[in-house]
Image: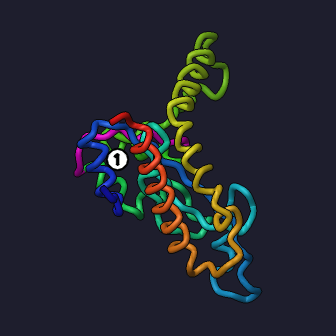
Amino acid sequence: MRLSTLAEVIDHLGASGRTGIIDGTEIRVRRPAVGRKDREKFISGKNKQNAVKAMVLTDAGGRLLFCSPAQPASCADITHARQLGLVKHLADGPAVEVLADAGYQGLGAQTGGRVVTPPHRKFKKNPPDCYEEIYERHRKAHSSRRIRVEHGIAHLKNWRALARHHGRREHMSDTVQAIAGLLSHQQTATRGARQPQ
């Protein structure tokens, strides 16, 4: 079965009762020429380098299910998710749990709690004695559940074309999605071969 849209992936997760994990990843690209319009849009606020960003969604086992078209890296993770229609798909679709990092805080309230992010730090100054220990325990538990998306991203970036892209930025979305499709097919074929007959 090929899942090509975000809506299909959400429906698949809902039908199978699985948890999804989302994260944004950046791919370095060549710097736009001097004087080019929107040159600053490609500068990442996180890494201070020229890059494009894609949103990756995996299942709890780290299998790549969806990779979005590339956006300039100045776009925030939460903004990118909203532009892709994640909020609408989760609010209108089946009951699905989606794990995310702190870059997606705020989506939980918009999706009826379907996007689960790390806990907010309630006390910035003078926290109660037991609070710090409880906060760290919850944060680590959330991190250990969503680590598989990092493995999915690492498999994606093992492809040389995505380690650092030297081609035209206009073709980057096609390249990212083609590699994501090949990787997803490869993961499905590998899992199918491992299952006993």
Residue at x 26%, y 43% (from the top left corner): 14
- Residue range corresponding to the magenta coloring: 92-102
Residue identified by numbered label 1: 110
Badge 1 density bin: few <14, some 14–19, many ≥20, Cα 10 Å: few
Front-most of 137 and 167?
A: 167
Q: Is residue 126 visible?
A: yes
Is 130 left, or right, of 184 in this rendering? right
What secondary structure is found at the residue carrying circle 1? helix
Colour setup of the view: rainbow
Give the amino acid type for the residue marked by disc 1 in the picture: Gln
Residue toward you, 127 or 71: 71
Tell me, yes or no, whether the highlighted magenta stretch contains residue 130: no
Q: Nearer the viewer, residue 17 or 121?
A: 17
Can residue 113 be seen at all in this image of the molecule?
no
Picture layout, residue 123 above or below residue 160? above
Q: Kindly identify the residue that appears in the image at 49 percent across and 54 percent down.
A: 56
Residue 114 at x, y percent in the picture: 34, 40
Q: Quadrant of the N terminus?
A: bottom left
Q: Residue at x 27, y 39 (%)?
A: 16
